Image (cartoon, rainbow, N blue to C red):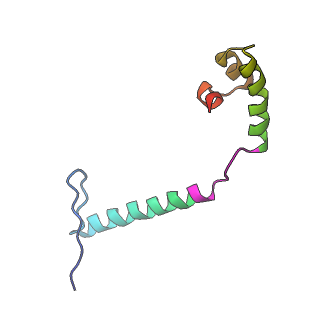
Amino acid sequence: MSEKLLQSLNDPIDTTSAQGRLMFNIFAWLAEFERELIRERPKGLSEPAKLTAAAAESPYQEGKLSVRQISRQLDISTGTLYS
């Protein structure tokens, strides 16, 4: 039976050693864990986020307040406001 080996040129992971195989398996487990967390996250906006978006939309569309003013009043970042 042929054992598959991985040796990274950029990272100190070498699956020919027990330590390398352990690190490889830890990274694989962490990647799987993160994928499952992403899958479990709710899609769309929560109700409080929808209310915040609605409060920001009118002054933004009408040009009554600057993006910075709206974001300060709603306590959100300007990047969040643009999103």
From what the image shows, is residue 72 above or below residue 81? above
Q: How many marks?
A: 0
- Who's the residue at 29% across and 68% down the image? 21
The prevailing secondary structure element of the residues shown in magenta is loop
- Quarter of the figure that contains the N terminus: bottom left
Residue 31 x %, y %: 45, 59
Q: Nearer the viewer, residue 82 or 62?
A: 62
From what the image shows, is residue 80 above or below residue 68? below
**Is 50 left, or right, of 12 in this rendering?**
right
- Who's the residue at 74% across and 27% down the image? 57
Q: Nearer the viewer, residue 77 or 67?
A: 67
Q: Is 81 within the magenta? A: no
From what the image shows, is residue 36 above or below residue 18? above
Residue 75: quadrant of the picture: top right
Residue 37: quadrant of the picture: bottom right
- Who's the residue at 51% across and 57% down the image? 34
Name the outermost residue toward the front: 62
**Is 83 left, or right, of 58 in this rendering?**
left
Residue 68 x %, y %: 65, 17
- Who's the residue at 22% across and 62% down the image? 14
**Is 39 left, or right, of 4 in this rendering?**
right
* Start-end of magenta stretch: 38-46
Residue 28 x %, y %: 40, 63
- Quarter of the figure that contains the C terminus: top right
Residue 35 x %, y %: 51, 59
Residue 74: quadrant of the picture: top right
